[in-house]
Image (cartoon, helix red, strand yellow):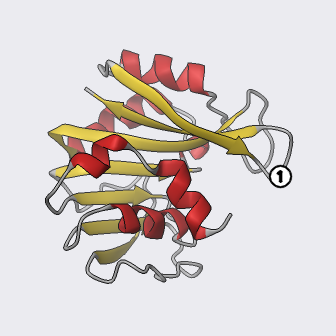
Amino acid sequence: MKLNEAIALIRNDFISSINSPMTWTDLGCGSGLFTNALSNLLKKESKIFAVDHNLSAFKNASGADANIIETIEADFINNELPVSQLDGILMANSLHYVAAKIPFINKIKRLLRDEGCFLIVEYERDNANQWVPYPINFSLLRNLFQEAGYSSINKLHERSSIYDQSKIYSALIRK
């Protein structure tokens, strides 16, 4: 996926409506594609903590130079993270690595401000494989976040995956 495609997948009215800098984290940032896509959507002087257990593939190539991207090498599933009071948590193709999703969601939602949100990118699939060990289709995502106390769970966009016949979707989750 190219940067402009990642930006289009996560673009939403909530982020667009905020006129001040925000603080986010990208859990499981990988190469940084979605970190950089988010950086392009946030207002200048925003900060993103890019978290991954191995940052060797991370590339900070964002065109949004006025935003700060700070990397943190950590296992976002098992480690406590040195961040708090976040405006948002981005998980792009990383929630499907979490086996125990409800305890995990309950743990990381404490990193958010009261009005903070989740921005999720996942595969619309039910069957596991070696790359998606714990799949989470949108229906399951909605149920999990409702159980975790969220009432606004909206699918934003969808596109075809280049890897198989499934779709990739994005969702914005707010209280």
User: Residue drawn at (86%, 39%), measured in percent from left and top?
Assistant: 165
Specify the quadrant of the image occupied by residue 173: top left
User: Residue drawn at (22%, 72%), measured in percent from left and top?
Assistant: 44
Q: Is residue 44 left or right of residue 151?
A: left
Q: What residue did someone put label 1 on?
A: 163
> Is residue 85 something one can see in this rendering?
yes
Q: Which amino acid, mark 1?
A: Tyr
Q: Residue 118: x, y in percent?
A: 36, 41
| Residue most extreme to the right | 164
For the residue pair 101 and 33, the one nearer the viewer reads as 33
Q: Residue 50: x, y in percent?
A: 39, 68
Q: Is residue 135 left or right of residue 163?
A: left
Q: Residue 58: x, y in percent?
A: 53, 78
Label count reads: 1
Within-10-Å neighbours for mark 1: few <14, some 14–19, many 20+: few
Q: Residue 56: x, y in percent?
A: 56, 82
Q: Is residue 123 above or below residue 152?
A: below
**Secondary structure beneath disc 1?**
loop
User: Residue drawn at (80%, 42%), measured in percent from left and top?
Assistant: 129
The image quadrant where one finds the C terminus is top left
User: Residue drawn at (59%, 50%), measured in percent from left and top?
Assistant: 93
The image quadrant where one finds the N terminus is bottom right
For the residue pair 130 and 150, the one nearer the viewer reads as 150
> Is residue 77 something one can see in this rendering?
no
Q: Is residue 55 left or right of residue 149?
A: right
